[in-house]
Amino acid sequence: MQPNLSELHPSIRPSSPKYIPVRAKFWISQAIALAWMGFSIVISLPWVYDLGQYVTHMVAVAIIAGISYIPGYLNAFMVASLLLDRQPRFKTVAPLEDITIVIACRNEEKGIGETLTRIAGQDHAGNIQVIVVDNASTDRTADVAREIGRQLGLDMLVVSERRPGKHNALNRALPLVTTRYVATLDADTLLHPSAIRYIVARMLSAPADVCAVAGAVLVRNSRKNFWTKIQEWDYFLGIASIKRLQGLYQGTLVAQGAFSLYETEAIRKIGGWPDAIGEDIVLTWRLLGTNRRVFFEPLAVAFTDVPETGKHFFRQRSRWARGMIEGLKAIKPWEHPIMFTRFLTGYNLIMPYLDIVYTFCWIPGLVAACFGYFWIVGPFTLLVLPLTILQNYILYRYQKSVFHVLGLKIRRNRSGFIAYVLCYQMLISPMSVWGYLQEWLKLRRVWK
């Protein structure tokens, strides 16, 4: 049975009568964030003076700005924005639009069957055509997909693309798409039964200049080990909070290839998916650069496998960081026509600086603090902590309401949450720095 609008949880119900325009929300959040940063600067002056005795005051300000002022400002902006956010109104929750799902596969014969089974189980009323692109597999991916597709009665086409690279696989399918909208889905990603219905409903409910909707991707294999447990909270809270913030300002920066819906003609107009290690990042930024907008739909949930080893986790996150740099090179933040998008992409300009300061100053400073030397890490660095806790609490409550609508339960993962709060940034920043260095040195790009 499909829930109607009145059944949605209060926190994701259509907009309240006291509507605040998006532009007003932006400036209110900016004022709060700047006030918080100003407060932080005033009370941290003794810290700047003490650290300046060792590294000069100019260097001290640069370090403290990277580990306290700017992160505090960004967290305050996010918390204020999330508190003001209301999901846009659905015009329908039972769309009839036909769509195409493209799945790029490389050596996925073991998992493609379950992915296709979840597609067959969608409660979307429109027709779903599936295009499976076998991208130079050395196993029986194509044969297994054809066999299972026939068994499930799917409207499916299996094609081959011998040139390695996800962009090649996706572009192989693009001329074969005959529907107005096309979705991409990773071969190891499983759709919630209502995922397609909700993501199409969001697209059809959005203004005409919205050309893509990013789905909500969560962790499927979270019970595997430490690495997957800690990533579960990143997807559930960290990535979800960023997506929701960007969606509020109508400029979701990554309509991720793992699960997103696009206007087919919009992709064709920009020449398809680019030859980039972060092809979905660059694609999204190019779409935004055409004066179009990208939304996020939290009810369109899919579950994906995340890296299960430190080695593969390191490769993935350094690849994401490199993809961000590719996006910045493709379209500069000041070239985006929409103000909100200029701000959101401009934030990415300072990410390398923050990651470098965190890696080479904060982490060594934490080690020094363990031995009683509080030159860099000390009581003032705790100013960011209350905002981080509040941000995570807001997102947890919001995600809990989403799960309630979808009939899902939040897994108990206390050890992963503790590790996420205490250690995650210490893992992510060095990985990102390596990704920036890879792009700077023009090292060989690897899709998977």
Image (tube, rainbow, N blue to C red):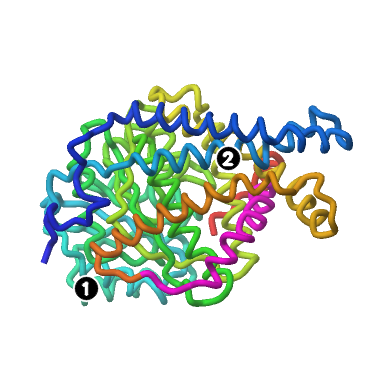
- Element under disc 1: helix
User: How far from the left and from the top, in percent, is residue 369?
Assistant: 80, 54
From which residue to which does the magenta span run?
A: 410-434
Q: Which residue is mark 1?
A: 150
**Towards the viewer: 443 or 298:** 298
Q: Amino acid at mark 1?
A: Arg
Q: Is residue 422 magenta?
A: yes
Query: Who's the residue at 30% across and 35% down the image?
Result: 266
Q: Is residue 99 magenta?
A: no
Locate residue 36 relative to residue 142 in the image: left or right: right
Query: Who's the residue at 74% across and 37% down the image?
Result: 63
**Towards the viewer: 114 or 196:** 196
Q: Amino acid at mark 2?
A: Gly
On residue 72, the disc is: 2
3D distance between C-alphas at marks 2 and 1: 54 Å
- Element under disc 2: helix
In front of the other: label 2 or label 1? 2
User: How far from the left and from the top, in percent, is residue 197?
Assistant: 19, 56
User: Is the magenta region chiefly helix, strand or loop?
Assistant: helix
Query: Who's the residue at 30% across and 63% down the image?
Result: 403
| Label located before the other in sequence (2 or 1) | 2
User: How far from the left and from the top, in percent, is residue 340?
Assistant: 41, 29
